[in-house]
Amino acid sequence: MKAWMLVLAMAIAGPAWAINDPNEMLKNPAQEARAEAIGSQLRCLVCQNESIEDSGADLARDLRAIVRQRVVAGDTDQQIMAWMVARYGQFVRLKPPLTLGTLLLWGTPVMGLLIGAAAAWLGRSHRTPPAPLTEAERAKLAEFGA
Amino acid sequence: MNRRLLLLAPLALTAAGGAAFWAMLNRMQQGTFDPHAIGNPMLGKPMPDFTLPGYDGARGFSSTDIRQAAQSKPVLVNFFASWCIPCAAEADVLNAVAQGGLQIWGICYKDKPDKMQAFLTQYGNPYTRIAADAAGRTAIDFGVYGVPESYLIDRAGIIRWHLPGPLTEQNVQQSLLPAIKATAA
């Protein structure tokens, strides 16, 4: 039974995705590094949680090729980003810029810290120091030999 | 008393989260909310310029052709492919919409001529005209991220409505038809 399952698992398991097809890469290592840096900041719209550099989707491959064409053509990083954003919106950027619309997104950690600090401040214990022992209590303690 | 109330706070938060989640699932079921939709920035902007060939020497079309055709009544541009399962699923709806008088211009995305022909033979051909986007570059200019996707072009050549995903009777009634009406106004 176990052997069967192993065979089955091996049959189902496909090869690892060949994402880095060497033919895709630019000959110039500096340009390729730039293209990879840009691509790693662009979301694959098909998988939505991978960058186009990491994704095996068809569309990601097309977008990788476009990034490389534009790098070779001499576009700046900003120009390439703007090209992508014009077609796919800010969502295509894995790291969205700080704007009025993303204020809440970027501000949430700060808000969390502030709320935590406020809660810690308000939650301080306001215990008054215990009242000194009365004569009777002192006598009782002496009785116990303390 | 104050402390008791504070203890209720996590419960209230969880309840609020649950209510929001329920509302989201409800809207997903009704088709009014798609968590994968990316909010196409092309909406309200002019359709991108392109010129595409047809298949097998057939005449394709360009953005200029669409703009001309849209001057009399709006054009629905539909990206499709024979290898795309939801495209087959929306075929009946597209045929019905075409019979209802809407002109649908098809852009066949990364496909082979014979496969596309077989697809149209099997599921019907709702298209006024068809062009081939073999490289998929025009689709990227439209902001397509997965076929089928549809764009409604108004008289001025502006994209007025967009649907990433298959047309259904429900979203035609609730979303496409009102959008067409709005272009006539």
Image (spheres, grey):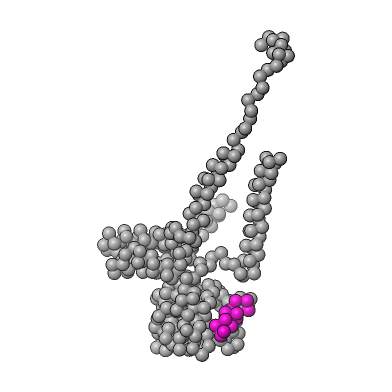
In this view, the residue farthest toward the bottom is B72
Where is A115 relative to A128, above or below? below
Magenta portion: prevailing SS class: helix
Q: How many marks?
A: 0
Q: Nearer the viewer, residue A104 or B96?
A: A104
Q: Nearer the viewer, residue B166 or B62?
A: B62
In this view, the residue farthest toward the left is A28
Q: Is residue A123 left or right of residue A113?
A: right
Q: Nearer the viewer, residue A128 or A6?
A: A128
Where is B40 relative to B13, above or below? below
Q: Which residues are magenta?
A: B173-185
Residue at 27 percent of width and 59 percent of height: A30
Residue B177 lies in the magenta-colored region = yes
Q: Is residue A137 left or right of residue B49?
A: right
Residue at 62 percent of width and 32 percent of height: A126
Q: Is residue A134 visible?
A: yes
Q: Quadrant of the C terminus of chain A?
A: top right
Where is A4 relative to B63, above or below? above
Q: Is residue A93 left or right of residue B104?
A: left
The percent position of residue A63, horizontal first and vertical second, equals 39, 68
Q: Is residue B120 visible?
A: no
The percent position of residue B55, horizontal first and vertical second, equals 42, 85
The percent position of residue A102, horizontal first and vertical second, equals 49, 59
Residue A27 occupies which quadrant of the picture? bottom left
Residue at 42 percent of width and 70 percent of height: A86
Q: Is residue A22 left or right of residue B75?
A: left
Residue B162 lies in the magenta-colored region = no
Where is B100 relative to B167, above or below? below
Q: Nearer the viewer, residue A120 or B49?
A: A120
